[in-house]
Amino acid sequence: MKYQIGDDIIVLLTSEEGKVVEIMNEEMVMIEVRGVKFPAYMDQIDFPYFYRFTKKKPIEPKKATQVFIENIPKEKPQPNKIKVDDGVWLSFIPQFNFDVFNDEVVESLKIYLVNHTNESYFFEYKHKQKDEAIFAFSNQINAHHDFYIHDIAFETLNDQLSFNFIFTLVKSDNQKAPHFETSLKLKPKQFFKRVEEMKEKNEPTITYLLFQQYPNRVFEENTLPLHKLTSAGFKVYDISKVKEHLTAAKSVIDLHIEKITNDWKHLSNYEILSIQLKEFEKWYDIAVANKQPSLIIIHGVGKGKLKDEIHEILKSRKEVKSFINQYHPKFGYGATVINFTY
């Protein structure tokens, strides 16, 4: 092992010095830089004395014995360095190699979180393959800084990858949202196209915008006095008894159009799909409001359009623990079972 716990190191990307605090495996170590701990690969760090030895020393200017003011050369005006404030990005740096036919191929991707804003953030990161978390950690990224996250094998792009973040301001602001969740899902065909465009344009990275501005807090509007609502004919319920007035939940919902409406034969496929999705959303919300542990959605087999639309919706719902479309004795392959978490 090249490094031991307690060794002084330097981060090659930023030239910041730190220490090794944990040996994670043969390729990675946990390092601490300015009080912040994060994982790093062996090839991203080095011993600081080697860096200092190989770094060129600055040439000291010769001291002048006597300088007259009229002989002092005028300095040329230097352009101001402007920091671009255009949001927080997720950046992918392809690592190329050559295959047996001497063709250039991408072996892996280095992933960086890039902060081009004037704010510093705490963030929680979760990397998922096929909706299953395989890597997660939390840390802090400072204003106008980059943060290396980890590497992924290029071949895993076919495994329904998603990159999920929860951001919080380091410097709290009552006018800003308490937290902000965002995620990125990579589609292989689109990403392969981006790689080819990057090579044609000779660009170093492929970047995706996570958010441009951290969102403001949403303040609830002032509510009307209750006596005005009741006098206007509205029913006002005690919030402690709200479940008594909820629509009763169902454990099985059949979305076949003839089960929803009798007047459907003149409708287009698009109109039928819209009605089915609206019915799904209705009973999904009722199930969640009633803290229902599970829900079975009968969507049929057909061409699979309704099933695909429902599955895409479920992927983004935080209260969904899991969902599965497998053979069922009653419904065959025409139903999806949803399990909730609260």
Image: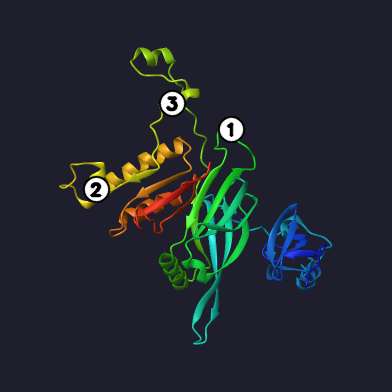
Image depth: mark 1 or mark 2 in front? 2
Q: Which mark is first along the chain, 2 or 1?
A: 1
Mark 2, residues whose alpha carbon is within 10 Å: few (<14), some, or many (≥20)? some
For the N terminus, which image quadrant? bottom right
What residue is shown with label 3? Answer: 244
Marks 2 and 3: which is nearer the front? Answer: 3
Viewed as shown, does residue 173 lie left or right of 284? Answer: right
Indicate the secondary structure of the residue bearing disc 2: helix
Using the image, determine if residue 201 lies above or below residue 137: below
Question: Which amino acid type is marked by label 3?
Answer: Glu
Image quadrant in which you'd find residue 147:
bottom right
Residue with the mark numbered 1 = 174
Determine whether 101 is above or below 331 in the image.
below
x, y percent for residue 51 = 76, 70
Indicate which label's residue lies in the foreground, 1 or 3.
3
The residues bearing labels 1 and 3 have C-alpha atoms spaced at a distance of 35 Å
Identified by mark 1, the residue type is Asn
**Mark 2 = which residue?**
272
Q: In which quarter of the view is residue 73 placed?
A: bottom right
Can you see residue 256? Answer: yes
**Quadrant of the image occupied by residue 53:** bottom right
Mark 1 Cα-neighbour bin, 10 Å: few <14, some 14–19, many ≥20? few
